[in-house]
Amino acid sequence: MKPVKQVDVKKNYNVNQLLTEMGLAGVMGAGRIAKAADIFEKMVKEKNCKVFLGVAGALVPGGMKDILIDMLDRRLINVLVITGANLTHDLVEALGYHHYQGSADVDDSKLYEKKIDRIYDSFMLNKVYEGMEDFFKKNIAKFEKPMNIKQFLWTLGSLIPKNNKSILRTCYEKKIPVFCPAIADSGIGLMVWGNLEKGKKIKVDAFDDLREMSRIAWDCKKAGFLYLGGGFPKNYIQQALQFSPKGADYGIQITMDRPEHGGSSGAELREGKSWGKLSKEAKFVDVICDVTIALPIIYSALLQRL
Amino acid sequence: MKPVKQVDVKKNYNVNQLLTEMGLAGVMGAGRIAKAADIFEKMVKEKNCKVFLGVAGALVPGGMKDILIDMLDRRLINVLVITGANLTHDLVEALGYHHYQGSADVDDSKLYEKKIDRIYDSFMLNKVYEGMEDFFKKNIAKFEKPMNIKQFLWTLGSLIPKNNKSILRTCYEKKIPVFCPAIADSGIGLMVWGNLEKGKKIKVDAFDDLREMSRIAWDCKKAGFLYLGGGFPKNYIQQALQFSPKGADYGIQITMDRPEHGGSSGAELREGKSWGKLSKEAKFVDVICDVTIALPIIYSALLQRL
Amino acid sequence: MKPVKQVDVKKNYNVNQLLTEMGLAGVMGAGRIAKAADIFEKMVKEKNCKVFLGVAGALVPGGMKDILIDMLDRRLINVLVITGANLTHDLVEALGYHHYQGSADVDDSKLYEKKIDRIYDSFMLNKVYEGMEDFFKKNIAKFEKPMNIKQFLWTLGSLIPKNNKSILRTCYEKKIPVFCPAIADSGIGLMVWGNLEKGKKIKVDAFDDLREMSRIAWDCKKAGFLYLGGGFPKNYIQQALQFSPKGADYGIQITMDRPEHGGSSGAELREGKSWGKLSKEAKFVDVICDVTIALPIIYSALLQRL
Amino acid sequence: MKPVKQVDVKKNYNVNQLLTEMGLAGVMGAGRIAKAADIFEKMVKEKNCKVFLGVAGALVPGGMKDILIDMLDRRLINVLVITGANLTHDLVEALGYHHYQGSADVDDSKLYEKKIDRIYDSFMLNKVYEGMEDFFKKNIAKFEKPMNIKQFLWTLGSLIPKNNKSILRTCYEKKIPVFCPAIADSGIGLMVWGNLEKGKKIKVDAFDDLREMSRIAWDCKKAGFLYLGGGFPKNYIQQALQFSPKGADYGIQITMDRPEHGGSSGAELREGKSWGKLSKEAKFVDVICDVTIALPIIYSALLQRL
């Protein structure tokens, strides 16, 4: 048995050195977050390993957008599954708007009067919807042909100016498949609805993406995943991994959700072995932590290793 | 100020009497779960109040299916938004299969060898997928025309034998709109994918339901909601409520998720006021509890009051 | 394998009938809370089984006091370990004061100005401390002799008028050992401190109770426990159970705390087997739930069975 | 309003640079953990500010011991309140034993047969108790005079060899008051009990420390605190802060516990304002995180700033 090394915090550690030191403790949160960096490193260095990224929760309003873009930009990620809310917040920032540092100790009725929308302690001005309406109005012709959701999202990305940092734009430019089965459940969905009501012919297929998603899983030699939060992004990747040759070889999830009530979001990764979603020999770790704390640390350490 | 009444547990209380007694304490979990029953009662007795039910988490494998069906059957619910996983588990049971009492303290690799899929401490035999394949194969013609997701789900419900208890069947029979924007993320989605690969022409629109969903919200005189877990079902209803005349008048959410990391699932209901999703004067409560504990108690009490 | 029975909520179920029905589902929270009632029933019906009750968290301000008293009064409990805060709140109510239904959405600085102390959404008037001071002033002579903490608490109980419902009074009357190693950490502790500063000779031994506590564990034929929250009450009982002949035979814990960070409060009960605190063959259950929700239901069902 | 800056993770950031960058996001976990470092820095740089450290949870088995020792050694901390379990694990390591990297996915009955005690995924050999028994046997005379708990713990510290890194030893050497009202609830308590049973006269007073603790609070010009976990350490410091001139000026708590059930451990810090434990103008933050993740990062950043 390996002793727990008491973490020694020397001056001038860079992030990777600290995380490596925490890995020597090897237990509880310290051990898990360090292990996540190790697995992430293996996953992206492994040849022929397809890396699936699942993104749920308020990551764009929470300041994680540029980290996600950097991952995509460096092609560390092969497939992105992400909530419509995060894509909407991404579009909002790409159109020049901001999220703001707010507070959760507020009178929400007063925020409503000021037309400020609250996402925990982050604020957004409700007028961003006007900006999105203008954007869709100007570009609606581009969407008036049958497509699947990935094509819809790439089209969206193609319309964002080249120099505006954006998840959607980066996926389009790098041709990274981006899936969002519940896209109707988002501000972007509302924009489409508005145009449907105006008689625009927007026809986006709900199931067609499954063909590409399943094929990617089917064809991969090795598979790895990083789940930032749960929701459908985790579940949709889990579902596809059943078709990978032997389940994922590498897996990381970062979540604050509990497993005991049986929901997919908080389910321990090892459960995936029973379904064939995770390989019997997989290296994996469940990090029980707020993504906005764990991700910058893990990703910082990863960059310092690459 | 009203004193906290120490809960007195007399013999032979029925569920409603106990919950009423807990409501006299008025604080913490005891107070909240009792308040949920009070608000639920008001919501379903209120004339012209549209009641939206959001269902996420492992509620069918967790034994909550018949309660959901009973709610629909009594027309206490006007709109259902539910995850594809729950609909898949509903279909599985409608086809004669079961979920089983298992354990989370198991070797998942051994379950895999035995072809048993684990959902926390509930088990399902993997062979249910064969049954679903047969079902879709037999009925595939019914799906080969353009439709939206609600029509797809009602079609599915129409094919379930009349006497088999089912959420899908009940929604179809009672003509209750049922929405599932992320339907591709489910075993049902996989069945469609299998048929797409065989060249079947299944065309289900991803956005079209938003027209009906928004119209229901727009037209309602009063609105109430019950969120069992979070995920897209909560978010999709929240989104629609922005179009209701003044936000929801009544709201209940039951969840184990935390608010601090900013995700929608754990967001406190009062946050919805800033967006106009919840009325300034709304009666609402956040019950921090496993749904499989809270729901049978709240619903039992409700039935005893009706 | 036993199928998950979908919970059927018939009209006019009493609490026990509902909990029994939830036990037929057998999984997740529904299964666990039902199992807790079954184990509690076995524990109190078992001859020669010593039952240890650990009480932490805001149970008296949360309305659970009378349930605790009822358990003690019926002698279902043989040993009580409880936080000083709960004993202080018990004394406060025994002296005629109340806790009040408040709210957590408040300006705490304003409460301070109004001399209202907040315990989540329960309020207490700060003037209760004056009442406690008077009580101790009047009775201080009773405490001026060397004693251990149990004797100190029984003395306290003996001074509470016979007809005032109180945990302390009931333990004294029924001669139920009550332990509180951290008694200095409480309003009662502050009262003693005030008198120490005035030169009163109060000498209460910090370790002496361990002799009785260990002997009870050592001598018991069978052992069972109910942990309401964690903290030192759980840990102190766990510690003693190491000296029981073969570890506890029955165990229930109800908590909202997580296990992953390694703290004792959220530790899964099965961990106790490694220490010899829980028997290899023990019947036990971890209920992940707010005590103020789970306890009234479990105890109600128990009474309906007795 | 200040925009949420998307976190930019450049290569070669040291820990402080990363945390500073996360602070520019300013929201959710990222914002809170960065704010904790800022407040910690202010607290220890402020002249005449007494800093109280509360330590609960498995911090020594979790690898945090040397960080705690470093804080004490640099005199950043003026008062330590800590659980008996952590002191026992500290003593265990001071006597030359280790904790080991284990796993929570184990058969606890098998660990019992191997005499391995589990603390989540950290292991300890049960034979450490023999080592502690020898230590106490050899030194028992030192404890055979009346003392309070602080004196008892300093005596313990004085007996640990000078070069063995230890929390107890450091508190003794630096004359830092260390309080542990529930010391009986620990392996150290069991050692005392063993000696009481052998007829040794160990008389440790349960309440006497309150005099020193209250005086420190009473006399401080400014006060700050860091709570690592909850339990009695947090509560005992909170209680003393009521006697500080105007409540604490600075406060940090790091915990995974929830507030809604009303327990002290998960209570939001702002609640302390109602009691006068926290100043109206205090700078404070609740970090919802596993201490073994948050502490090394915050403390690393602090050292890089000092």
Image (spheres, coloured by chain):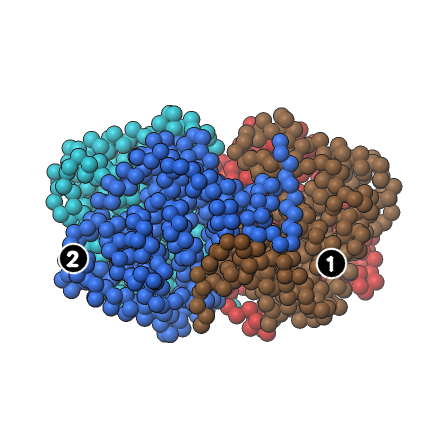
Chain colours: A brown, B red, C cyan, D blue
SS label for mark 1: loop
Rendered location of residue C210, percent (x, y):
22, 57
Q: Residue at x 45, y 64 (%)?
A: A5
Q: Residue C243: x and y, percent?
A: 26, 65
Q: Would you say residue B9 is visible in this rendering? A: no
Left or right of B271 on screen, residue A145: right
Seen in the image, is B190 located left or right of residue D105? right
Quarter of the N terminus of chain B within the rendering: top left
Question: Which amino acid, mark 1?
Answer: Arg
Q: Residue at x 87, y 47 (%)?
A: A145
Whether discs 1 and 2 lie on one chain: the answer is: no
> Label 2 crowding class (10 Å Cα cut-off): few <14, some 14-19, many 20+?
few
Q: Quadrant of residue D47?
A: top left
Q: How many marks?
A: 2
Q: Nearer the viewer, residue C195 or C102?
A: C195
User: Measuring 67% from the left and 57% from the top, which residue is drawn there?
Assistant: A53
- C-alpha gap between disc 1 and disc 2: 68 Å
Chain ID at mark 2: D
Query: Quick check: C192 above or below D182?
Result: above
Amino acid carrying label 2: it is Glu
Q: For the residue labelled by badge 2, is the local secondary structure a helix, a strand or a loop? A: loop
According to the image, label 2 marks what residue? D144
- Name above or below for residue B217 compared with residue B152: above
Report x, y in % for residue D9. 64, 50
Q: Are marks 1 and 2 in contact (CB under 8 Å)?
A: no
Point out residue B82 in the picture as x, y percentages from the top left corner.
Answer: 64, 48
Q: Chain of mark 1?
A: A
Which residue is at a point 82% across and 60% down the rendered structure image? Answer: B200
Label for residue A75? Answer: 1
Q: Which mark, residue D185?
A: none
